[in-house]
Image (cartoon, coloured by chain):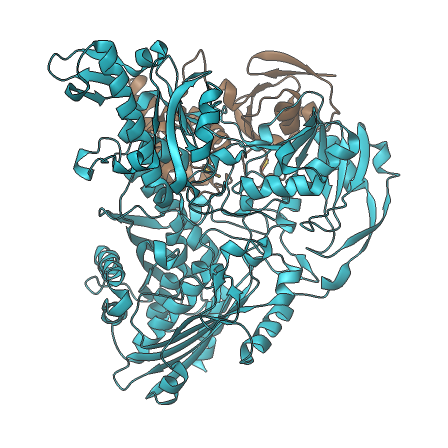
Chain colours: A brown, B cyan
Amino acid sequence: MLTLTVNGQQKQVDVENDTPLLWVIREHLQMTGTKFGCGAGLCGACTVHLDGTAVRSCQTAARDAVGKKITTIEGLTVGGKPHPLQDAWIAEQVAQCGYCQSGQIMQAASLLATNRDPTKAEIVAHMDGNLCRCMTYGRIQKAIIRAAADIRAKSGA
Amino acid sequence: MTHIERNSLRRRSFIVGASATGLAFGYVAANGIKDALAAQSFGPTAWYSIGPDGIVTVMVGKAEMGQHVSSTMCQIVAEELEADWSKVRIALPNNDPKYNDPMLGALITGGSWSTRMNFETMSRAGAAGRITLIEAGAGLLGVPVGECRASNGQVIHSKTGKKVSYAKIVADGKASKTWTPDELKAIKLKTPDQYKLVGVAVPQLDIPSKTNGTAKFGIDTMVPGMLYGRPVMPPVRYGATVKAVDETEARKVKGYVKAVTLDDKTGTTSGWIVAVATTYEGAKKAADALIVTYDKGPNANVSDQTIIDEAKKLQASDAAGQLFVSQGDPAAAIAGAAKTVEAEYLTSINIHAPLEPMNATAYEQGGVWHVHTGNQFASRTGGIAAAALGVDPKNLVLHQYFMGGGFGRRLDADMVIPAVLASKAVGKPVKLIYAREDDMAMDFTRPLTYQKVKAGVDADGKLVGLQHDVVCAWPTARWGIPEFLTPAVDKKGPLDGFTVNGADFWYTVPNHKVRAILNELAQRATPSGQLRSVAPGWTFWAVESLIDELAHAAGKDPVDYRLAMLDGAGNNAGGAKKLANALRTAAGRAGWGSVTLPKNTGMGIACVSSQERATATWTACAATVEVNPTSGAFEVKKLNVAMDLGTVINPDGVKAQIEGSTLWGMSLALFEQATLKNGALQATNFGDYTPMRMSEMPELDISIIANNDPPSGCGEPAVTVVAPAIANAIFNAVGVRVRSLPITQAAVRTALQAKKT
Ligand code: FES
Ligand code: FES
């Protein structure tokens, strides 16, 4: 038994220590917003936050997430209020098949948490590990820029 | 295996009547009306329904894989229905034939056909619903029907402004009507100037759920008590058999249940095993721990080179293949030509790799099998699952989901076989998920293609004769559905038109032959599939490269040279001029001939009539590419794409599709290559099969040309136009020609070195 903190809630899971966090979240806890794309750290579909930092849950052993705050796409909406990135994703009509987008949004959220005015080059550098097979890259960039502006405007910066 | 009944809708009536969930609207076979009415309801929902809350739910029989076709279909219905867009929802049907595509007679999504084929049917369904609601609404308002109209989910009495909502009319429960086929046909549909939703960039209905994790894909299926399976794939793509399985190590894995060796009666798979465990991580560990002895079968020595050698041998034989195009006498024209040009064009094996790996969840309940998976060809896939189980297809329900990418991969049915056979073997529900490595190794690939062209030009450089041979595996022939094959013009039996489409271009060439040749060796070793854009992805690679070569040889401008051949003569009337217009647009937007490019930078042009001649979308691309003349390294700076696709239902959706497919075209042209070695596909994961990343994206400029022609597909054509535009740009930059896809730095360097010596 491991105790994990997912989106602010304590969860007991009966898994082996080395089970990838991805399968714990998706299958054991049945929170399916986090996606499996490659299982090898190559696509970013499984991206979640550990204490606010974006990590590949397929490359994170469940044991290593114990005692840390795990945030998934389901936890990005706080109190029914979508994250500015989620609004921007709709405004820019980013998603095609949508399968990569949970991971894209989680990856982008970790960028905006520390950089509220990223340049295009910074966005590309931060996002390049997240594959989108539908190639929605242009809209992802626009949505991140829009969300950043939105966050700055709201905080009066 | 699957019988495709075309055009079955022509004999159908349309009925509106009460159902369990409100008011249902749907087509029924003429003889089915009585039954449907007698049953008081014909739900759950055929085509669409309106609930007492006014929510309009449209059953979309089209696979939603990111092209937003579900939303587009809703837009078409909602336009004529006068529905309130904020109240429209998508529902995905199972494989019941009542949801079949009215034109194709099956549940299938591909070929960019959806919008074109369904536009009128969906429009009439919406209009019949609107008229029925107006009649019922007028009754409720106590006013004459003729004085009422519908707008935004309400019936309005024009004189007094009195209104009643669709929700109220449905709640009242009295609306009901049967439309005969003739009455349906007599409905006057809106003209484009009356459109409120068609042509408007309304927000796509499927997008919000894809930003918060709630969109459900096949892989998200959860069934109580289910076990997990991971396939163990054989060391060759096809033809292996399992000799022995040693489970000693696997048994040590926590939760291990069993290894199921598949006895696949459909022949879709060969030599597959499923490791079943109580968890997926357990199934994965067990799969790795199984020690399997195989007989690798007859294809273990087949590699890329073997396939190419065989293709060349076939092409050299006059007896091989069948004719797809035969016009005039190219042999004589070429023999009498002032100059002849011969060239070979190749494209590599490519794999789909949608981001959601293949998966399916299967179980039996009360004598009925249930399979949950996102699939583009539910009719056939359900049939194959039933055949693998040996049950009547009537007793198998395929449940549809959003697809985490399709691109043609989910037209195939392989993923349901390990799921149903494993579930049958363990007597419990099984959720089967391919690891990425399994998904890549067993892809139904875009086949390796070899094309040989022989062209004759007159003293002016004009193309007077062309012989074009296309040799590859035949993806569609593998399906065994005769209706999907094309009769050969030389009467030598059916050919796979999905290997030569596009070669029947709109240029006027007086003497022209196109021969389709099946490479059986490749067909056996690498069962091929439909990969986004299919044949035009390779035929235009050859045609548009060749035309460029001929233009340069004649000392003519490649745009002018093409325009001269797009004269619209004879049966090229109409289309050729639209293509010429798209060509001018892309060239103009790029500044063709007017901008001064830096040294070693070139602009290349290409234009295509993908997908099929009968359903062409008119697309052109200008590519700007900078090449390092020493190393051969190159960078695509910009792609200008222009597309004429008739009626545009959702301009932003169209733009999104063009963006994605343009980048797909570039990804295939430069970054994606799988090879076959000793019968096995050499691609394991996104480390060695490498679709384009964000950092590799060029600048894009997209022009949409909309006229009021019937809508044509926009998700595939751009895939086909980019590769030749890039190759032509490289030629213009540094004077070397690459004739093999993908275009690599090494290939450019080799060509540069050959030019120097
Ligand atoms: S699934 Fe984790 S990076 Fe691809
Ligand atoms: S939207 Fe399909 S993979 Fe990104």
Where residue B341 appears, x then y in whole percent? Answer: 40, 81
Q: Residue at x 17, y 13 (%)?
A: B143
Query: In the drawing, does residue B177 fall left or right of residue A129?
Result: left
Where residue A145 appears, x then y in whole percent? Answer: 34, 32
Query: In the drawing, does residue B462 fall left or right of residue B426?
Result: left
Q: Nearer the viewer, residue B76 or B10?
A: B10
The image quarter containing residue B245 is: top right
Relative to B114, residue B253 above or below = above
Relative to B467, residue B702 above or below = above
Q: Residue at x 33, y 63 (%)?
A: B606
One can see residue B281 in this view? yes
The image quarter containing residue A122 is: top left
Q: Nearer the viewer, residue B371 or B689?
A: B371
Q: Residue furthest right?
A: B248
Q: Nearer the viewer, residue B254 or B393?
A: B393
Q: How many marks?
A: 0
One can see residue A99 in this view? no
Query: In the drawing, does residue B90 fall left or right of residue B194?
Result: right
Q: Nearer the viewer, residue B677 or B29?
A: B29
Where residue B334 appears, x then y in whole percent? Answer: 38, 85
Relative to B303, residue B66 above or below = above
Where residue A84 appears, x then y in whole percent? Answer: 38, 22
Q: Residue at x 86, y 32 (%)?
A: B252
Q: Residue at x 45, y 14 (%)?
A: A78
